[in-house]
């Protein structure tokens, strides 16, 4: 009998038990290998998901920054003022109509993580439009704000697109950030002069 054949049929003693070799490996060795492969696959899937989430977050940030540029171009053509919206039930749609001539792609109105695009024809982002002129963006001149870096002017319609309970927002100086829903609501209901 060849040596390899003897190995494949040998019985190893380990802690008093007999382990059958299968093609040169014990069942335990095979299980260890399978466990390691499963672990590596899990790590790869987690890593891929993390990378995709980061890319989507970056794309959403980019959308908001491009919408800010469009808002500035709109203001340049309209006496420095933001779009005036009177129908508060149609805010995203009305702002989108105003900004469309100033964007290169309509896609920037949607967060890549928005799974209900058809339900939101105005896009994934809502704007700081209220009935109170002290808090509203409607017709506002951004260049006259005292603290534009503290005034949220737009944010995702629904929270949790990127992180649980958080929404991606755009400030009046063009920077973006993730804030809690409570912080978002507190900001947009505070008179702009007090921020
Ligand atoms: Zn988003």
Image (cartoon, helix red, strand yellow):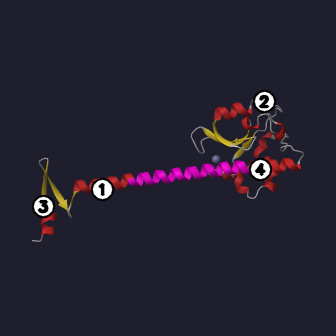
Lateral position of residue 167 relative to residue 100, left or right: left
Q: How would you rate the neighbour count of disc 4 (Cα within 10 Å): few for under 14, some for 14-19, many for 20 or more?
A: some
Q: Earlier in the sequence, mark 4 or mark 3?
A: 3
Q: How would you rate the neighbour count of disc 2 (Cα within 10 Å): few for under 14, some for 14-19, many for 20 or more?
A: some
Q: Position of residue 39 (x, y in %)?
A: 37, 51
Span shown in magenta: 40-66
Gap in angstroms between the C-alphas marked 3 and 1: 21 Å
| Residue marked by disc 1 | 33
Q: Give yes or no for residue 10 being in the magenta stretch.
A: no
Q: Is 44 located above or below residue 178 in the figure?
A: below
| Residue marked by disc 3 | 10
At x 53% / y 52%, what residue is drawn?
A: 51
| Residue marked by disc 2 | 191
Q: Earlier in the sequence, mark 2 or mark 1?
A: 1
Gap in angstroms between the C-alphas marked 2 and 1: 62 Å
| SS label for mark 1 | helix
Residue 69, disc: 4
Gap in angstroms between the C-alphas marked 4 and 3: 74 Å
| SS label for mark 2 | loop
Judged by depth in the image, the label closer to the viewer, 4 or 3, is: 4
């Amino acid at each position: 009998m060849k040596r390899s054949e003897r190995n494949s049929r040998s019985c190893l003693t380990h802690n008093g038990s007999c382990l059958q070799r299968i093609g040169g490996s014990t069942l335990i060795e095979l299980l260890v290998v399978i466990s390691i492969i499963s672990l590596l696959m899990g790590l790869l899937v987690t890593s891929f998901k993390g990378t995709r989430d980061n890319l989507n977050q970056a794309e959403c940030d980019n959308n908001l920054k491009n919408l800010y540029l469009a808002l500035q171009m709109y203001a340049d053509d309209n006496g420095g003022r933001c779009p005036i919206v009177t129908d508060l039930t149609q805010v995203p749609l009305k702002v989108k109509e105003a900004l469309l001539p100033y964007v290169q792609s309509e896609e920037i109105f949607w967060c890549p993580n928005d799974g209900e695009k058809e339900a939101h024809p105005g896009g994934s982002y809502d704007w700081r439009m209220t009935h109170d002129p002290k808090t509203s963006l409607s017709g506002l001149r951004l260049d006259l704000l005292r603290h534009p870096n503290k005034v949220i002017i737009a944010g995702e319609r629904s929270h949790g697109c990127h992180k649980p309970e958080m929404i991606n927002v755009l400030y009046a100086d063009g920077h973006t950030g993730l804030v809690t829903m409570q912080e978002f609501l507190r900001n947009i209901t505070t008179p702009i002069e007090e921020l």
